[in-house]
Image: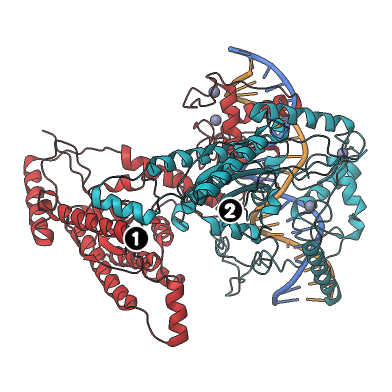
Chain colours: A red, B cyan, C blue, D orange
Amino acid sequence: MKYIFQIECTDTIMDSWNMDFLNSTLLTPDLPSDTDLFFGIGDFPLSDSPPNHLSFDSICMSALDKELSCSPSTDSGKGDSEDSESIIQRGEPENLESIIQREESDDSESIVHRGELEISEPINKGESKDSKLEQQPPKKKHRKNQPPDAEHLPPCRVCGEKASGLHYGANTCEPCKGFFRRSIVKIEKKNEKYVCAKGDGSCKLGTGKRTMCSYCRYKKCLDVGMAHGAIKIGRYTHEKRTKDITEVRKLKLKENQTVDTTSIDVTEQEVDELVARLIVIQEEFCADFRKSFEPGGLLEKHTFVYERFKEKMETFGNLSPVPWSTYNEFLSATGLELDDRKSRMNLIAARMEQAVRNMVTFARNIPGFSDLQTPDQLDLLKVFAGPLEVPIFGQHFSQITHLEQKPKNRF
Amino acid sequence: MKYIFQIECTDTIMDSWNMDFLNSTLLTPDLPSDTDLFFGIGDFPLSDSPPNHLSFDSICMSALDKELSCSPSTDSGKGDSEDSESIIQRGEPENLESIIQREESDDSESIVHRGELEISEPINKGESKDSKLEQQPPKKKHRKNQPPDAEHLPPCRVCGEKASGLHYGANTCEPCKGFFRRSIVKIEKKNEKYVCAKGDGSCKLGTGKRTMCSYCRYKKCLDVGMAHGAIKIGRYTHEKRTKDITEVRKLKLKENQTVDTTSIDVTEQEVDELVARLIVIQEEFCADFRKSFEPGGLLEKHTFVYERFKEKMETFGNLSPVPWSTYNEFLSATGLELDDRKSRMNLIAARMEQAVRNMVTFARNIPGFSDLQTPDQLDLLKVFAGPLEVPIFGQHFSQITHLEQKPKNRF
DNA sequence: CAAGGAGGTCACAAGGTCAT
DNA sequence: ATGACCTTGTGACCTCCTTG
Ligand SMILES: [Zn+2]
Ligand SMILES: [Zn+2]
Ligand SMILES: [Zn+2]
Ligand SMILES: [Zn+2]
């Protein structure tokens, strides 16, 4: 018998200034077709709002952060005690980066430039790697050849394979670097031309297909910014290095989200207990959650409200409220407020904070959640806030990022 | 013999709602009367369109931006950041303002906050890697490392980049300092010699060309007075400091007022090569470009279409399409579309995106273009979109902005 | 003291070479 | 023509020392 447990905590707050309404809306869980059970919570009030995403972002941020970082529980040893002061460190209202960074500094791997970058070295440390004394049996009298360094690089921008460094301005693999060098001579100096193998310059450069079409390969090189003048030699800047590392990390993270499938063995009894527990907390937090997606449920209601609003807008044009600039001008000139946006924002802010708090509390009640590292916890909790002219009711979170109408903020 | 190479990339997409047609139209290159050759591309379909400039703007924008920004922006640390992660940092999908801002930052007074912004401070200090020895007393509240100082220094006398101080008697950048140090050893101690890459010791050391010819670089070092004997160590005198500052100020002033007209020396052969290359890419991208301006060419056709349209309008009055409000009312009332504007817009949008992409690809193929900084590249690429009641056929781009009918957008 | 430069260090990339 | 490997120059950053 095999069970797949998939836990997703998704809370969405949608704010569209063009549509002049703010709306916590429903997203559909991304479930395999043979799912037996699913659990969740929702917080779906409807209301208007003036457009100010940034403040909403911060609200969600700090709420999420506050909730997670004050976690008294868990185990995982060293944990969070150090957090408390890092809040002070930056006066700033803590954004995503600070959260991520802080978390990573707990673990073994952290971005530290200590005269030299040290990343998760699988070395048995504690040893002073000090001066000149012998300590390395495999002493190479040969030059210190460090062939496999820097896999802190994003993959080749041209062909996608493992990059070997920054060549002619772009992270590329060794083959693509060589190819570009030869191409420069050929194309710019000798005025020869590549011709697309397919004729229309649309060849894909997937793995192994690198050498299929020189024309398209060269074009891709140019597209990613390779050029004589873009050559950058010498040691990396700390800044640049950090950027590379974070990019790779982000990529890895994304990869893990989709691919990672670990399975553990559980007894029948454990499963029963888990399900029982889930049912309990489901009841406790949001008994109607599953009904939301059924006919007559909240999803339908939301859709209805949205449709009506759309109609209204098409008939009467854009009903967006007075822009902030006007509002502020008027305010400073007359001391009067043009509308009640201020108080409404406070209301919404409070509600959002509450929503995030609920979400985290709910998640904490899921057996095992608190045992996860903070970064992993964060990874399971998604909040979306931003303007969208496209309805996202009933879509899964991962799909939002694929809409051509790019959301303003995602975290 | 003197050649003037003037490269202009101008792509125009004109949309006039009063005239009810959208038109990529021809602009005449702004050429001196004695021009021998000119090259370019064009994308000149004729079609109708409903008025919606904003969306077109965004299309051009994001296309231009996407094309250009994916280049890692060469050197000069502050070049603009890569997107990939900036999604979170400044999630906005770069709009008109941001681009314009970037452009304007050249001339006006962005100088003020140049380099002052030091957000991320690499903390490399305070780590003692030696275990046993007691740490050093100089672990004070004061920050030991004051990496960049007031850059009230004139640029590197050798290569022109940002200088880091007074090295071997001249204001130079860190790279040139290092280069000279190595050169001293090589030349004076080991009696080795550099050889000019071009053979005649006349290489220019423009931006990014620093490493092209060691011989000329070293020669330049000597020319600007670098020498072992010229070393000056220790704190600045007040006098020297003020001298620097006034020099910098003077330089900035001059820079702002005079249009920079640099001329470089090229050999006959280089010219031939360049021209040959230009002819090749001209052929490849838009073989008929020059014919467009000849009798019977596209310019004439465009003019003809426009004339006919004008006649029609004079006879039958303004033929502007149904306004959006009406269209939407009708749509929401009956569910029917009054015309096919939706699909036409999609078509046009796609075409515009393609046009911009073409333009950038073309430009990238011009020798040297990719070597420019991204802002400078942007500066050479013009796309115009907006309503105009005045025909602009055959006018140069710079004239458009002088029309009293101010174009809506320029970027 | 603290500002400021010389020199050292070594991570990095350009370009060359040569077996495929 | 390709790409693994090598040689060599480069330059970001640091430590140490000199000087006002
Ligand atoms: Zn590659
Ligand atoms: Zn191809
Ligand atoms: Zn220099
Ligand atoms: Zn030379």
Q: Is residue B35 left or right of residue B383?
A: right
Residue A166, position in %: x, y? 60, 40
Residue B377 pos. (x, y %): 66, 47
User: Which residue appears farthest toward the bottom when viewing the image?
Assistant: A335
Quadrant including the C terminus of chain A: bottom left
**Which residue is at the front of the view, B341 or A135?**
B341
Image location (x, y in percent) of residue B191 = 91, 39
Residue at 9% across, 53% down:
A277
Q: Nearer the viewer, mark 2 or mark 1?
A: 2
Where A401 sits versus B286, above or below? below
Chain letter of the residue beneath label 2 in the structure image: B
Circles 2 and 1 on the same chain? no
> Can the viewer see residue B112 in this picture?
yes
As measured in the structure, the alpha-carbon distance from the residue carrying label 2 to the one carrying label 1 is 26 Å
Residue annotated with mark 2? B389
Chain containing the residue with disc 1: A
Amino acid type of the residue tagged 2 in the rendering: Glu
Indicate whether B309 appears above or below B118. Answer: above
Quick check: which quadrant has ligand 2?
top right
Report whether A19 appears left or right of A42.
right
